Amino acid sequence: MKYHGVTLHRKLENNIGLLIFGILFISSIGGLVQVLPSIFQESLKTATENSHLYSAVELTGRDVYIREGCHVCHSQQIRPLLAEVERYGPYSRADEFVYDRPFMWGSKRTGPDLHRIGGKYSDDWHRVHLIDPRSVINNSIMPAYPWLAEWEATDLGDIQKKMSVLRILGHPYTDEEIAAAPEEIAGLSQLDALIIYLQVLGTGLAEEYR
Amino acid sequence: MISDGREIYHDGVVKRLIQFSIIWAVVGMVVGVWLAAQLIWPGLDFGQFWLTFGRIRPLHTNGIIFGFGVSALMATAFYSVQRTSNVPLFMPRLAWICCYGWQVLVLLGGISLLAGWTSTKEYAELEWPFDIVITILWVCFAVVFFGTIATRRIRSIYVSNWFYGALIIVIAMLHIVNNLALPVSINKSYSLFPGAQDAIVQWWYGHNAVGFLLTGGFLGMLYYFLPKQSGQPIWSYRLSVISFWAFTYTYIWAGPHHLHYNSIPEWVQSLAMVMSLILLAPSWATMINGIMTVSKAWRKLSVDPALKFIVLALAFYGLATFEGPMMAIRSVNIVSHFTDWTIGHVHSGALGWNAMITYGTFYYMVPHMMGRELYSVRLANIHFWLALAGTMLYILAMWGAGVSQGLLWLSIDDIGELSYSFNDVMAAMVPYYALRLVAGLIFLAGTVLMAYNLFRTMYGRHTVAVSPPLIIDELQGTVYKEEPREPSSGNAQEVPA
Ligand code: HEM
Ligand code: HEM
């Protein structure tokens, strides 16, 4: 046994092709056994009553959220822990995220979790807070985003193309929805779109899980 | 390169990469300090959209990891692969393309992050056009590196090269899979994976970017420069073999410890937790191997700043790889996840391990390559103490902040209500964040000292010409304890006279 081990390794050490192959082989096992099955696991990608398909405006708001990097300070993932459920609401479920590309769970809570922020405050509260957080919470360390109120939602890229691309990925947008999209976002500021997105967050969860 | 009919190692590209790496270190840390300050004075974005925290945080991580880290890894890989293969770089032009191409990528990539182009996936934020360029440059890196090994004039491949090799191969695999997306426009794409699956794939990438870049690649540095600088062979070559394969196999499984109690299957989390605990073994085996290697050179340690940095880096490597598995335990992670504890862990690895070992190797390489003494050993010693103080203060501040956040957020009073509002806890962070800012400034000051010191050492000189030894010389012998096993007489004959 020992002898075999030693000679095998001598071979690897002396042959760069074998060494490359060895590294590739050994390092892919974990991914194949652990990650690949998750990619085929239907329950992680199948829409249910809890899944909410973003409208054109919500999708635009989400892209504002992404562009501004809100996710570096805010998570969107409520863990099934007593204190957490009490603070933020019912814990997050995998089927609520099947239309999230990319996922927005985050890794750091410099600010509070936002997964169930929808409906917690009025639109006006958000408007004031986003334009100047310190006018609401006097020691807040959140950045102010006054320019969002001036920027047009239509400047954020071709919404129809976005929806078509998402449709290829399996988001069930109808032709009518895609056709109507530009009109829906016309005239809105990026702040409006962002607030509409925030207000829908976490509201898709079915009654029985609340 | 041939001069007087003799081959010469290509060290010009190494020198240039070191210079870029130092510049990115300073830039990245200035941004880090700025971030730290913004968390105390949010007005420091001056009302400019491109200076807000959400945009410059990824600039910090990408600038440091890809600018400072990868440039340093390329520099040290190119330096050591020639000397452990006894042959100049394969396709040196391509190495230069790699060097400059990478700098342009980091520069433009950084600007694109400020412009708000982001895929949001941590450490893979750059959008798809950059991802394609990264892939191409990475292939160039691979060609130069593996080409040099393939044309080597020493029979066996030295252990540092396996780690650099694993860095190149595994990062390529992770990068390609994690960035699979359908483009909408030049600056926007949608991930191929939805929600929970996207999270699993991202942290398979994210954790192993830490594993094979910030850990594996830098272990390559360790295995070459520690024996070189201490003048001692690796304590146990066999242990290095075993820990290499254990490390390569185990790391890949650990990613989902970033998603404990999140909406992903429980078996995936538990498996990741077990594998993270197992990871302690190869990590500490490596650390012990390193410490035992210097144990015969303690005297040198007290006078040699390069060696001091490398050994201190090993100690922080031990700390980070002990803390990591502890945080991967689900019940501990309940407290640490989402808090500044993670940030403290990150920087004990990032400052204590990655930055320190890089500083140590730079202090070794630059005088060797320039053929002159370090400009000032005194400054290097001051840098050492600044780096140590900055790192310790950073970690302590973040432990304080993180553990309090974790416990206060979870705290529930007698009647079952939350004891503290979010804003109470936020307000309590100010002193910790202030300490962290001071820590960052101290660390940055040290880095600036090094930049000055090394640029003075390099100033006005070309790299000295070094040829591959005709026979394996004594120094090479110190790198190899057991290898080459039949001491090189066979190989030596192949070397053209
Ligand atoms: C045995 C080794 C290690 C293990 C098991 C480990 C484990 C962990 C765990 C459990 C987390 C927290 C995840 C969370 O709750 O979100 C974490 C975060 C992190 N660790 Fe480690 N760690 C190890 C070594 C290192 C080293 C050496 C570095 C070097 C820099 C490092 C860099 C990071 C980074 C950058 C993060 C933050 C990821 C993020 O949330 O953005 N780790 N690690
Ligand atoms: C002067 C030194 C540095 C300072 C002051 C600094 C400061 C910071 C700050 C303030 C953050 C954001 C934390 C938050 O969101 O709460 C951060 C994140 C981060 N830094 Fe640094 N940093 C420094 C050096 C470094 C170095 C040398 C590295 C890597 C080698 C590094 C890697 C990271 C990473 C990976 C993160 C993201 C952590 C996560 O997402 O969990 N930093 N840093």
Image (cartoon, coloured by chain):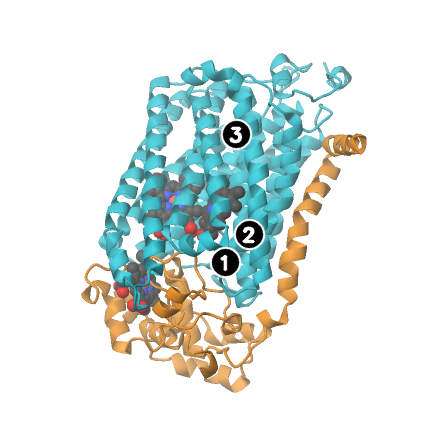
Chain colours: A orange, B cyan
Residue B280 percent location from the top left of the image? 55, 40
- Label 3 vs 2, first from the N-terminus: 3
Image height of B470 relative to B321, above or below: above
Q: Residue at x 57, y 56 (%)?
A: B270
Q: Are marks 2 and 1 in contact (CB under 8 Å)?
A: yes
Q: Amino acid at mark 3?
A: Val
**What amino acid type should be assigned to the residue bearing mark 2?**
Met
Q: Residues within 10 Å of mark 2 (few under 14, many from 20)?
A: many
Q: Viewer-proximal residue, B165 or B88?
A: B165
Q: Amino acid at mark 1?
A: His
Q: Quadrant of residue B360?
A: top left
Q: Chain of mark 1?
A: B
Residue located at (58% from left, 50% from top): B274
**Left or right: where B300 falls relative to B55:** right
Camera-near label (3 vs 2) is 2
Residue placed under numbered mark 2 in the picture? B273
Per the image, label 3 sits on a secondary structure element best described as helix
B115 relative to B352, above or below: below
Image mark for residue B492? none
**Residue at the extreme front of the image, as rendered:** B414
Q: Which residue is label 1 attached to?
A: B260
Earlier along the polypeptide chain: callout 3 or callout 1? Answer: 3
> To which chain does the residue with label 2 belong?
B
Label 1 residue near ligand 1, CB within 8 Å: yes
Q: Is residue B480 left or right of residue B263?
A: right
Q: Which image quarter is the C terminus of chain A in? A: bottom left
Protein chain holding label 3: B
Dot 1: few (<14), some (14–19), or many (≥20) neighbours within 10 Å? Answer: many
* Residue at image coords 39%, 26%: B455
* Label 3 sits on residue: B14
